[in-house]
Image (tube, rainbow, N blue to C red):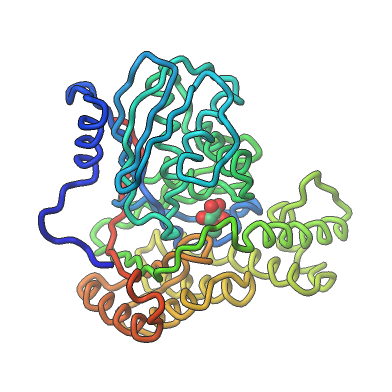
Amino acid sequence: MTEQATSWTPPQEQAAGALIRLHGAPAGALRFVWSPYRICPLGAHIDHQLGTVTALAIDRGTWLAFWPWDRPEVAVSRLGHEGQVRLRVDEPPPPARGDWGDYLRGAVQALQQSGWRLRRGFAGVTSGELTEAGLSSSASVGLAYLLALETVNGLEVAPEDNVRLDQAIENGYLGLRNGILDQSAILFSRRRHLTVIDCRRFEAGGGAAAAVRRVPAPSGVEQPRWLVALSGVTRAILATGYNQRVAECEAAARVLLEAAGRRAERPRLGLVTPEEYARWADRLAGAPARRARHFFEEMRRVAEGVEAWAAGDWARFGRLMTESGRSSIENYECGSEPLIDLYRLLVATPGVLGARFSGAGFRGCCVALVEPERAEATAREVMAAYRQRQPAWAERAGHVIVEAADGACVQ
Ligand code: GLA
Protein backbone atom coordinates (compact mmCIF):
# COMPACT_ATOMS: atom_id res chain seq x y z
CA MET A 1 0.00 0.00 0.00
CA THR A 2 1.44 3.35 -0.95
CA GLU A 3 0.10 6.86 -0.95
CA GLN A 4 -1.12 8.12 -4.34
CA ALA A 5 0.72 11.29 -5.35
CA THR A 6 -0.85 11.92 -8.76
CA SER A 7 -4.38 12.56 -10.07
CA TRP A 8 -5.84 12.27 -6.63
CA THR A 9 -9.39 13.44 -5.98
CA PRO A 10 -10.14 14.39 -2.36
CA PRO A 11 -12.47 11.81 -0.77
CA GLN A 12 -15.24 14.34 -0.13
CA GLU A 13 -15.32 15.18 -3.84
CA GLN A 14 -15.37 11.50 -4.76
CA ALA A 15 -18.28 10.92 -2.37
CA ALA A 16 -20.17 13.96 -3.70
CA GLY A 17 -19.57 12.88 -7.32
CA ALA A 18 -20.89 9.40 -6.60
CA LEU A 19 -23.97 10.79 -4.84
CA ILE A 20 -24.80 13.01 -7.81
CA ARG A 21 -24.30 10.10 -10.23
CA LEU A 22 -26.28 7.55 -8.21
CA HIS A 23 -29.22 9.68 -7.08
CA GLY A 24 -29.22 12.70 -9.37
CA ALA A 25 -28.73 14.86 -6.27
CA PRO A 26 -28.49 18.57 -7.14
CA ALA A 27 -24.96 19.75 -6.24
CA GLY A 28 -26.34 22.74 -4.28
CA ALA A 29 -28.40 20.49 -1.98
CA LEU A 30 -25.50 18.35 -0.79
CA ARG A 31 -24.37 18.37 2.83
CA PHE A 32 -21.28 16.76 4.33
CA VAL A 33 -20.19 15.19 7.58
CA TRP A 34 -16.49 15.11 8.35
CA SER A 35 -15.77 12.50 10.99
CA PRO A 36 -12.04 12.02 11.64
CA TYR A 37 -10.18 8.92 12.74
CA ARG A 38 -8.28 9.01 16.03
CA ILE A 39 -5.04 7.92 17.57
CA CYS A 40 -4.61 7.16 21.26
CA PRO A 41 -1.01 7.81 22.33
CA LEU A 42 -1.53 6.84 25.99
CA GLY A 43 -4.35 5.10 27.83
CA ALA A 44 -4.56 1.71 26.14
CA HIS A 45 -7.51 -0.50 27.09
CA ILE A 46 -8.44 1.41 30.18
CA ASP A 47 -11.46 3.34 28.89
CA HIS A 48 -13.82 0.40 29.44
CA GLN A 49 -12.47 0.21 33.02
CA LEU A 50 -13.31 3.89 33.64
CA GLY A 51 -9.70 5.00 33.39
CA THR A 52 -8.37 8.26 31.95
CA VAL A 53 -7.25 8.16 28.33
CA THR A 54 -5.61 10.50 25.83
CA ALA A 55 -6.43 10.93 22.17
CA LEU A 56 -6.14 13.10 19.08
CA ALA A 57 -8.28 13.26 15.98
CA ILE A 58 -6.24 13.07 12.78
CA ASP A 59 -6.55 14.52 9.30
CA ARG A 60 -7.79 11.22 7.86
CA GLY A 61 -11.32 9.99 8.35
CA THR A 62 -14.78 9.49 6.91
CA TRP A 63 -16.53 11.92 4.63
CA LEU A 64 -20.25 11.35 4.29
CA ALA A 65 -21.86 13.29 1.45
CA PHE A 66 -25.61 13.32 1.98
CA TRP A 67 -28.70 14.65 0.29
CA PRO A 68 -31.54 15.25 2.77
CA TRP A 69 -34.95 14.17 1.53
CA ASP A 70 -38.44 14.06 2.99
CA ARG A 71 -38.93 10.28 2.89
CA PRO A 72 -38.40 8.29 6.14
CA GLU A 73 -35.70 6.26 4.44
CA VAL A 74 -31.93 6.17 4.10
CA ALA A 75 -30.07 4.84 1.07
CA VAL A 76 -26.32 4.75 1.53
CA SER A 77 -23.45 3.52 -0.61
CA ARG A 78 -19.79 3.33 0.15
CA LEU A 79 -16.97 4.23 -2.23
CA GLY A 80 -15.16 1.14 -3.42
CA HIS A 81 -17.98 -1.22 -2.38
CA GLU A 82 -20.79 -2.75 -4.39
CA GLY A 83 -24.40 -2.23 -3.48
CA GLN A 84 -26.41 0.03 -1.29
CA VAL A 85 -27.95 -0.21 2.17
CA ARG A 86 -31.59 0.93 2.27
CA LEU A 87 -33.52 1.23 5.46
CA ARG A 88 -36.64 2.85 6.88
CA VAL A 89 -35.82 5.20 9.73
CA ASP A 90 -39.29 5.10 11.32
CA GLU A 91 -39.26 1.33 11.96
CA PRO A 92 -36.93 -0.80 14.12
CA PRO A 93 -33.98 -1.85 11.95
CA PRO A 94 -33.19 -5.53 11.32
CA PRO A 95 -30.53 -7.27 13.44
CA ALA A 96 -26.84 -6.81 12.59
CA ARG A 97 -25.71 -8.62 9.46
CA GLY A 98 -21.96 -8.38 9.87
CA ASP A 99 -21.47 -5.94 6.98
CA TRP A 100 -20.65 -2.22 6.83
CA GLY A 101 -24.37 -1.36 6.78
CA ASP A 102 -24.54 -2.37 10.45
CA TYR A 103 -23.26 1.06 11.49
CA LEU A 104 -26.19 2.69 9.68
CA ARG A 105 -28.71 0.21 11.11
CA GLY A 106 -27.14 0.65 14.54
CA ALA A 107 -27.33 4.47 14.29
CA VAL A 108 -31.04 4.33 13.46
CA GLN A 109 -31.65 1.92 16.33
CA ALA A 110 -29.61 3.96 18.83
CA LEU A 111 -31.57 7.14 18.06
CA GLN A 112 -34.93 5.36 18.14
CA GLN A 113 -34.15 3.60 21.43
CA SER A 114 -33.18 6.82 23.11
CA GLY A 115 -36.56 8.26 22.25
CA TRP A 116 -35.90 10.33 19.13
CA ARG A 117 -38.54 10.14 16.39
CA LEU A 118 -37.00 9.96 12.96
CA ARG A 119 -39.22 11.15 10.10
CA ARG A 120 -36.69 11.98 7.43
CA GLY A 121 -33.71 10.27 5.89
CA PHE A 122 -31.16 10.92 3.18
CA ALA A 123 -29.28 9.48 0.26
CA GLY A 124 -25.62 9.27 1.10
CA VAL A 125 -22.19 8.09 0.05
CA THR A 126 -19.35 7.52 2.49
CA SER A 127 -15.67 7.56 1.72
CA GLY A 128 -13.62 5.01 3.56
CA GLU A 129 -9.85 5.07 3.34
CA LEU A 130 -7.67 3.28 5.89
CA THR A 131 -10.48 1.15 7.31
CA GLU A 132 -9.57 -1.86 9.46
CA ALA A 133 -6.39 -0.06 10.43
CA GLY A 134 -7.02 0.39 14.16
CA LEU A 135 -7.75 4.09 13.66
CA SER A 136 -11.37 3.73 14.74
CA SER A 137 -13.06 3.89 11.39
CA SER A 138 -16.05 2.18 13.08
CA ALA A 139 -16.79 5.01 15.49
CA SER A 140 -15.98 7.51 12.74
CA VAL A 141 -18.57 6.05 10.37
CA GLY A 142 -21.14 5.43 13.12
CA LEU A 143 -20.91 9.07 14.21
CA ALA A 144 -21.14 10.25 10.60
CA TYR A 145 -24.50 8.46 10.24
CA LEU A 146 -25.73 9.77 13.59
CA LEU A 147 -24.82 13.37 12.75
CA ALA A 148 -26.46 13.16 9.31
CA LEU A 149 -29.66 11.63 10.75
CA GLU A 150 -29.78 14.31 13.44
CA THR A 151 -29.23 17.07 10.85
CA VAL A 152 -32.00 15.97 8.49
CA ASN A 153 -34.43 15.53 11.40
CA GLY A 154 -33.52 18.84 13.03
CA LEU A 155 -32.49 17.15 16.31
CA GLU A 156 -30.33 19.07 18.77
CA VAL A 157 -28.11 16.43 20.35
CA ALA A 158 -25.31 17.37 22.75
CA PRO A 159 -21.86 15.93 21.92
CA GLU A 160 -21.85 13.83 25.10
CA ASP A 161 -25.15 12.29 24.04
CA ASN A 162 -23.61 11.48 20.68
CA VAL A 163 -20.81 9.69 22.54
CA ARG A 164 -23.49 7.57 24.26
CA LEU A 165 -25.43 7.02 21.06
CA ASP A 166 -22.37 5.79 19.22
CA GLN A 167 -21.50 3.62 22.20
CA ALA A 168 -24.99 2.16 21.91
CA ILE A 169 -24.20 1.18 18.31
CA GLU A 170 -21.04 -0.63 19.36
CA ASN A 171 -22.11 -2.07 22.74
CA GLY A 172 -25.82 -2.54 22.17
CA TYR A 173 -26.21 -3.25 18.49
CA LEU A 174 -22.87 -4.93 17.72
CA GLY A 175 -21.99 -6.46 21.09
CA LEU A 176 -18.45 -5.08 21.48
CA ARG A 177 -17.81 -4.16 25.12
CA ASN A 178 -15.61 -1.18 24.35
CA GLY A 179 -15.41 2.16 26.10
CA ILE A 180 -15.83 5.78 25.03
CA LEU A 181 -12.30 6.59 23.86
CA ASP A 182 -13.02 6.53 20.13
CA GLN A 183 -16.24 8.54 20.08
CA SER A 184 -14.93 11.15 22.52
CA ALA A 185 -11.72 11.62 20.56
CA ILE A 186 -13.64 12.09 17.33
CA LEU A 187 -16.12 14.56 18.78
CA PHE A 188 -14.00 16.60 21.19
CA SER A 189 -10.52 16.88 19.65
CA ARG A 190 -8.94 20.12 18.47
CA ARG A 191 -5.77 20.72 16.49
CA ARG A 192 -2.57 21.10 18.55
CA HIS A 193 -4.36 19.74 21.63
CA LEU A 194 -4.22 16.46 23.48
CA THR A 195 -7.74 15.38 24.42
CA VAL A 196 -7.84 13.89 27.91
CA ILE A 197 -10.96 11.90 28.76
CA ASP A 198 -11.82 10.87 32.31
CA CYS A 199 -14.15 7.96 31.60
CA ARG A 200 -15.19 7.60 35.23
CA ARG A 201 -16.44 11.17 35.42
CA PHE A 202 -18.12 10.76 32.09
CA GLU A 203 -19.99 7.68 33.29
CA ALA A 204 -20.94 9.44 36.51
CA GLY A 205 -22.93 11.85 34.31
CA GLY A 206 -20.59 14.81 34.63
CA GLY A 207 -20.80 15.43 30.89
CA ALA A 208 -18.02 16.76 28.71
CA ALA A 209 -17.41 19.83 30.88
CA ALA A 210 -16.34 17.64 33.80
CA ALA A 211 -14.85 14.70 31.91
CA VAL A 212 -12.98 16.10 28.89
CA ARG A 213 -9.95 18.40 28.90
CA ARG A 214 -7.99 19.69 25.97
CA VAL A 215 -4.36 20.28 26.80
CA PRO A 216 -2.63 22.62 24.32
CA ALA A 217 0.86 21.86 23.10
CA PRO A 218 3.09 24.78 24.11
CA SER A 219 3.40 27.41 21.42
CA GLY A 220 6.83 28.00 19.98
CA VAL A 221 7.84 24.34 20.38
CA GLU A 222 7.99 22.35 17.17
CA GLN A 223 5.39 19.58 17.06
CA PRO A 224 6.64 16.07 16.43
CA ARG A 225 4.94 14.12 13.65
CA TRP A 226 2.67 11.12 13.97
CA LEU A 227 3.56 8.09 11.92
CA VAL A 228 0.83 5.54 11.33
CA ALA A 229 2.55 2.27 10.40
CA LEU A 230 0.09 -0.23 8.96
CA SER A 231 0.86 -3.88 9.61
CA GLY A 232 -1.46 -5.13 6.88
CA VAL A 233 -3.33 -7.34 9.37
CA THR A 234 -7.06 -6.60 9.12
CA ARG A 235 -8.87 -9.16 11.27
CA ALA A 236 -12.09 -7.86 12.84
CA ILE A 237 -11.96 -6.76 16.46
CA LEU A 238 -14.94 -8.85 17.62
CA ALA A 239 -13.17 -12.02 16.57
CA THR A 240 -10.29 -11.13 18.87
CA GLY A 241 -9.99 -11.46 22.63
CA TYR A 242 -11.24 -7.91 23.27
CA ASN A 243 -14.37 -8.83 25.26
CA GLN A 244 -12.54 -11.61 27.10
CA ARG A 245 -9.96 -9.13 28.38
CA VAL A 246 -12.71 -6.76 29.49
CA ALA A 247 -14.15 -9.68 31.52
CA GLU A 248 -10.69 -10.41 33.01
CA CYS A 249 -10.35 -6.77 34.08
CA GLU A 250 -13.74 -6.99 35.73
CA ALA A 251 -12.82 -10.23 37.48
CA ALA A 252 -9.81 -8.41 38.95
CA ALA A 253 -11.96 -5.45 39.95
CA ARG A 254 -14.45 -7.74 41.70
CA VAL A 255 -11.72 -9.31 43.86
CA LEU A 256 -10.17 -5.95 44.73
CA LEU A 257 -13.49 -4.29 45.57
CA GLU A 258 -14.53 -7.22 47.73
CA ALA A 259 -11.21 -7.12 49.57
CA ALA A 260 -11.79 -3.42 50.19
CA GLY A 261 -15.26 -4.20 51.54
CA ARG A 262 -17.12 -2.58 48.65
CA ARG A 263 -19.47 -3.88 46.01
CA ALA A 264 -20.35 -2.52 42.59
CA GLU A 265 -23.09 -3.67 40.28
CA ARG A 266 -20.60 -3.71 37.47
CA PRO A 267 -17.09 -3.92 38.96
CA ARG A 268 -14.47 -1.97 37.04
CA LEU A 269 -10.84 -1.26 37.85
CA GLY A 270 -11.46 2.47 37.81
CA LEU A 271 -13.59 2.06 40.92
CA VAL A 272 -10.57 0.74 42.84
CA THR A 273 -8.18 3.34 44.27
CA PRO A 274 -4.40 2.97 43.68
CA GLU A 275 -4.02 2.55 47.47
CA GLU A 276 -6.54 -0.29 47.53
CA TYR A 277 -4.77 -1.91 44.61
CA ALA A 278 -1.39 -1.64 46.35
CA ARG A 279 -2.89 -3.21 49.46
CA TRP A 280 -4.81 -6.08 47.88
CA ALA A 281 -2.96 -6.84 44.63
CA ASP A 282 -1.57 -10.12 46.00
CA ARG A 283 -5.10 -11.53 46.04
CA LEU A 284 -4.97 -11.57 42.25
CA ALA A 285 -3.39 -14.26 40.10
CA GLY A 286 -3.02 -15.13 36.42
CA ALA A 287 -4.65 -13.04 33.70
CA PRO A 288 -6.70 -10.79 36.05
CA ALA A 289 -3.47 -9.91 37.93
CA ARG A 290 -1.74 -8.91 34.69
CA ARG A 291 -4.73 -6.88 33.45
CA ALA A 292 -4.90 -4.99 36.75
CA ARG A 293 -1.14 -4.28 36.67
CA HIS A 294 -1.59 -2.84 33.18
CA PHE A 295 -4.49 -0.65 34.31
CA PHE A 296 -2.76 0.96 37.27
CA GLU A 297 0.56 1.44 35.47
CA GLU A 298 -1.20 2.91 32.44
CA MET A 299 -3.10 5.37 34.64
CA ARG A 300 0.26 6.60 35.96
CA ARG A 301 1.65 6.90 32.45
CA VAL A 302 -1.37 8.94 31.35
CA ALA A 303 -0.93 11.39 34.24
CA GLU A 304 2.79 11.74 33.51
CA GLY A 305 2.17 11.96 29.77
CA VAL A 306 -0.25 14.84 30.14
CA GLU A 307 2.44 16.76 32.04
CA ALA A 308 5.04 15.94 29.40
CA TRP A 309 2.68 17.08 26.63
CA ALA A 310 1.93 20.37 28.36
CA ALA A 311 5.68 20.97 28.71
CA GLY A 312 6.39 19.99 25.09
CA ASP A 313 8.70 17.26 26.34
CA TRP A 314 8.24 14.93 23.38
CA ALA A 315 11.10 12.64 24.35
CA ARG A 316 9.43 11.87 27.67
CA PHE A 317 6.01 11.55 26.06
CA GLY A 318 7.47 9.13 23.51
CA ARG A 319 9.16 7.02 26.20
CA LEU A 320 5.82 6.66 27.97
CA MET A 321 4.20 5.54 24.72
CA THR A 322 6.83 2.86 24.27
CA GLU A 323 6.31 1.67 27.85
CA SER A 324 2.56 1.60 27.24
CA GLY A 325 3.21 -0.54 24.15
CA ARG A 326 5.34 -2.93 26.18
CA SER A 327 2.66 -3.25 28.84
CA SER A 328 0.00 -3.89 26.18
CA ILE A 329 2.12 -6.83 25.02
CA GLU A 330 3.27 -8.20 28.38
CA ASN A 331 0.44 -7.39 30.78
CA TYR A 332 -2.59 -6.86 28.59
CA GLU A 333 -1.38 -9.55 26.17
CA CYS A 334 -2.85 -8.11 23.03
CA GLY A 335 -1.15 -7.70 19.68
CA SER A 336 -0.72 -10.20 16.92
CA GLU A 337 2.75 -11.44 16.01
CA PRO A 338 3.18 -9.09 12.99
CA LEU A 339 1.98 -6.08 14.99
CA ILE A 340 4.37 -6.85 17.85
CA ASP A 341 7.19 -7.20 15.33
CA LEU A 342 6.30 -3.80 13.85
CA TYR A 343 6.27 -2.23 17.33
CA ARG A 344 9.73 -3.66 18.07
CA LEU A 345 11.10 -2.41 14.77
CA LEU A 346 9.72 1.05 15.41
CA VAL A 347 11.09 1.45 18.90
CA ALA A 348 14.55 0.30 17.73
CA THR A 349 14.71 2.86 14.90
CA PRO A 350 16.49 6.21 15.37
CA GLY A 351 14.10 9.10 14.84
CA VAL A 352 11.25 7.29 16.63
CA LEU A 353 10.54 8.94 20.00
CA GLY A 354 7.96 6.36 21.01
CA ALA A 355 5.47 3.88 19.62
CA ARG A 356 2.56 1.68 20.55
CA PHE A 357 -0.48 -0.03 19.05
CA SER A 358 -3.00 2.56 17.98
CA GLY A 359 -6.33 0.94 18.81
CA ALA A 360 -7.24 -2.38 20.34
CA GLY A 361 -3.92 -3.69 19.04
CA PHE A 362 -4.90 -7.01 17.57
CA ARG A 363 -4.73 -5.81 14.00
CA GLY A 364 -4.10 -2.61 12.09
CA CYS A 365 -1.37 -0.18 12.91
CA CYS A 366 1.19 1.05 15.34
CA VAL A 367 1.35 4.77 15.94
CA ALA A 368 4.72 6.40 16.50
CA LEU A 369 5.83 9.83 17.56
CA VAL A 370 8.68 10.75 15.22
CA GLU A 371 11.19 13.54 14.88
CA PRO A 372 9.71 15.91 12.29
CA GLU A 373 12.78 16.47 10.12
CA ARG A 374 13.25 12.80 9.32
CA ALA A 375 9.71 11.47 9.61
CA GLU A 376 9.43 10.22 6.05
CA ALA A 377 12.90 8.65 6.01
CA THR A 378 12.22 6.94 9.33
CA ALA A 379 8.93 5.58 8.03
CA ARG A 380 10.54 4.17 4.88
CA GLU A 381 13.32 2.53 6.85
CA VAL A 382 10.91 0.83 9.26
CA MET A 383 8.49 -0.31 6.59
CA ALA A 384 11.25 -1.73 4.35
CA ALA A 385 12.52 -3.82 7.26
CA TYR A 386 8.97 -4.88 8.18
CA ARG A 387 8.18 -6.01 4.63
CA GLN A 388 11.30 -8.11 4.60
CA ARG A 389 10.53 -9.73 7.94
CA GLN A 390 6.81 -10.21 7.31
CA PRO A 391 6.46 -11.16 3.63
CA ALA A 392 2.92 -12.50 4.20
CA TRP A 393 1.72 -9.00 5.14
CA ALA A 394 4.08 -6.96 2.95
CA GLU A 395 1.62 -6.18 0.20
CA ARG A 396 -0.99 -4.63 2.48
CA ALA A 397 1.49 -2.91 4.77
CA GLY A 398 2.11 0.80 4.39
CA HIS A 399 2.44 4.07 6.21
CA VAL A 400 0.90 7.50 6.47
CA ILE A 401 2.21 10.56 8.28
CA VAL A 402 -0.74 12.33 9.82
CA GLU A 403 -1.46 15.62 11.54
CA ALA A 404 -3.70 16.27 14.52
CA ALA A 405 -7.05 17.69 13.37
CA ASP A 406 -10.29 19.17 14.64
CA GLY A 407 -13.14 16.87 15.62
CA ALA A 408 -16.25 15.92 13.66
CA CYS A 409 -18.51 18.54 12.06
CA VAL A 410 -21.43 18.90 9.68
CA GLN A 411 -21.00 21.23 6.70
C1 GLA B 1 -10.67 0.05 20.70
C2 GLA B 1 -11.95 0.35 21.48
C3 GLA B 1 -11.70 1.48 22.50
C4 GLA B 1 -10.46 1.21 23.35
C5 GLA B 1 -9.27 0.81 22.49
C6 GLA B 1 -8.08 0.36 23.29
O1 GLA B 1 -10.34 1.14 19.89
O2 GLA B 1 -12.97 0.72 20.60
O3 GLA B 1 -12.85 1.66 23.29
O4 GLA B 1 -10.72 0.25 24.33
O5 GLA B 1 -9.61 -0.25 21.59
O6 GLA B 1 -7.55 1.39 24.03
Q: How many marks?
A: 0
In this rendering, position of residue 346 left or right of residue 51 = left
Quarter of the rendering containing residue 238: bottom right
Query: Residue 150's spot in the image, x, y percent?
Result: 43, 24
Query: Residue 157's spot in the image, x, y percent?
Result: 47, 25
On-image quarter of the N terminus? bottom left
Quarter of the rendering containing residue 203: top right
Q: Nearer the viewer, residue 309 or 406?
A: 406
- In the rendered image, the vertical position of residue 405 relative to residue 387, given as above or below: above
Query: Residue 401's spot in the image, x, y percent?
Result: 27, 64
Residue 53 in sight in this render: no
Quarter of the rendering containing residue 116: top right
Task: Tell me the residue at 42%/72% (across/down).
Answer: 355
Find ligand 1 in the image and state its quadrant: bottom right
Q: Nearer the viewer, residue 50 or 147?
A: 147
In this rendering, position of residue 49 left or right of residue 252 = left
Task: Tell me the residue at 62%/59% (across/down).
Answer: 242
Task: Tell me the residue at 40%/61% (across/down).
Answer: 309
On-image quarter of the C terminus? top left
- In the rendered image, the vertical position of residue 125 relative to residue 358, given as above or below: above
- In the rendered image, the vertical position of residue 263 relative to residue 125, given as above or below: below
